[in-house]
Amino acid sequence: MRRFFKLPYILIALVIISAVPVSAMQYRDAGIQAPAKKEPLVLSFTGDMMAHVINYSMKDYSLIYRDIESIMQNDSLTFSNVEFPVNPEIPQASYPVFNIHPEYVMAAIDAGVDVVSIANNHTADQGVPGLQATVSTMYSLMNYYKKQQNRELHFSGAKDNPETDFKPVTIYKNGWKIGYLAVAQFSNHNPGRGYMQLVDFRDREETSAFVDFIKKVRTDYDLFVLAYHGGVEYLAEPVKAKTEFFNDLVAAGVDIIWGHHPHIIQPVDIVTTEGRTGVVMNSLGNFISGQGRIIDPDLPEEEWSYTGDSAIIQVEAAFRNGRIVFDRVEAIPTANMMTTNREVVITPLEQLTHQPVPQPWNDFFMQRYMLMHDYFNRNIRQIDLTGSR
């Protein structure tokens, strides 16, 4: 694996893309007063929220997010991929067939997560009953946070009724009408047609139909975010077919593609094509997992070390002169660190370079920081495909 990771805080370019303003009538139809002005959005995107035994055995899940919750609470929306079924009626279980209880997810929500994807290869690990329980749990959490904190929680990626249509979730924030949809390339345990939206980037018929679908629904929104779970695990670059699919989605109207599944970070691309510009996060690694428990601190460049790296990508969007403007795309590198109590927590990687950490971990995190600094210097990339087709 080539060396690849990043920088603490990277500011990227001003990018302008076309957008179709949502009419006041569409707000009225939703029972919401049309805003006079769209205020800037700061959207934070995280990697895979995994739950191995070492993670869900913790007594206090809130400790996982203690070092990063200020980041997630001082933005407009934070997105995270919940990579396991959530069924409180059966025991918790780890790889290869997951199941986790709601309290684990609630810790992330309490720390600042607002938008969840439940479209991934582990969604149906517990079959249709587990998938339906996950959807039911998410609705229960939505109601709980609305009632207890007057706070909106949103999710996409699976549904408990296979007869209903797949459609984007609508999020109203800062005067914006945001479309959000989560899909996956495949499911380890296929629950059957209609429960998940599966789009294999290798299948031209599937991708073409999905791109056409995006073109139709995009006009209803000011901004469109697509979560896509797929690709090749542990590969440092996205494969060509997935890149081409993502480029087609940007051309079709997707403004932000939030990718996950490879469990290591892949480059962030700012893609201009067909007169549009979109932010493409190919993979953000493991937000929280137990995979790093077997990392050797004496081997900071060993392949497995990359499973302990992640980043919170912040995208700042504004609406000026009838167009979306991306004022900032910034990477905040994070690492999964094991405490002296053998509990895994998320910490900004820069913080780990100047706080007391036992040797040899101090040297390990310094090396990881340097690798990630170098990675994001090179790999938040401007890609202009205009006229290339």
Image: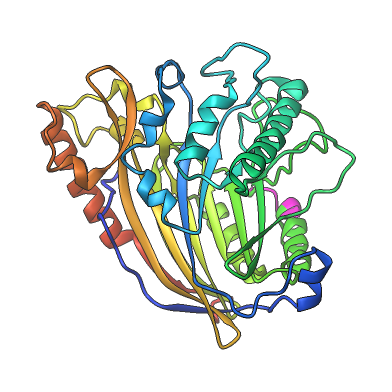
Tell me, yes or no, if residue 119 can be seen here. Answer: no
Question: Which of these two is toward me, 375 or 388?
Answer: 375
- For image coordinates 85% across by 37% down, the residue present is 162
Image coordinates for residue 238, horizontal then vertical, percent: 47, 50
Image coordinates for residue 203, horizontal then vertical, percent: 69, 48
On the image, which quarter does residue 90 sit in? Answer: top right
Image coordinates for residue 288, horizontal then vertical, percent: 41, 33
Check if residue 272 falls in the magenta segment: no
- For image coordinates 43% across by 15% down, the residue present is 57
The residue sitting at the bottom extreme is 321
- Residue 214 appears left or right of 164: left
Task: Name the dominant secondary structure of the magenta segment.
Answer: helix
On the image, which quarter does residue 306 sit in? Answer: top left
Way the structure is coloured: rainbow
Image coordinates for residue 59, horizontal then vertical, percent: 41, 17
- Residue 226 appears left or right of 15: right
Q: Is residue 190 above or below residue 99?
A: below
Residues rendered magenta in the picture = 202-206
Q: Quadrant of the N terminus?
A: top left
- For image coordinates 57% across by 20% down, the residue present is 98
Question: Which of these two is toward me, 190 or 347?
Answer: 347
The residue sitting at the right extreme is 163
Q: Is residue 326 above or below residue 300?
A: below
Q: Is residue 172 above or below residue 71?
A: below
Tell me, yes or no, if residue 132 can be seen here. Answer: yes
Question: Which of these two is toward me, 328 or 266?
Answer: 328
On the image, which quarter does residue 263 sit in? Answer: top left
Q: Quadrant of the C terminus?
A: bottom right
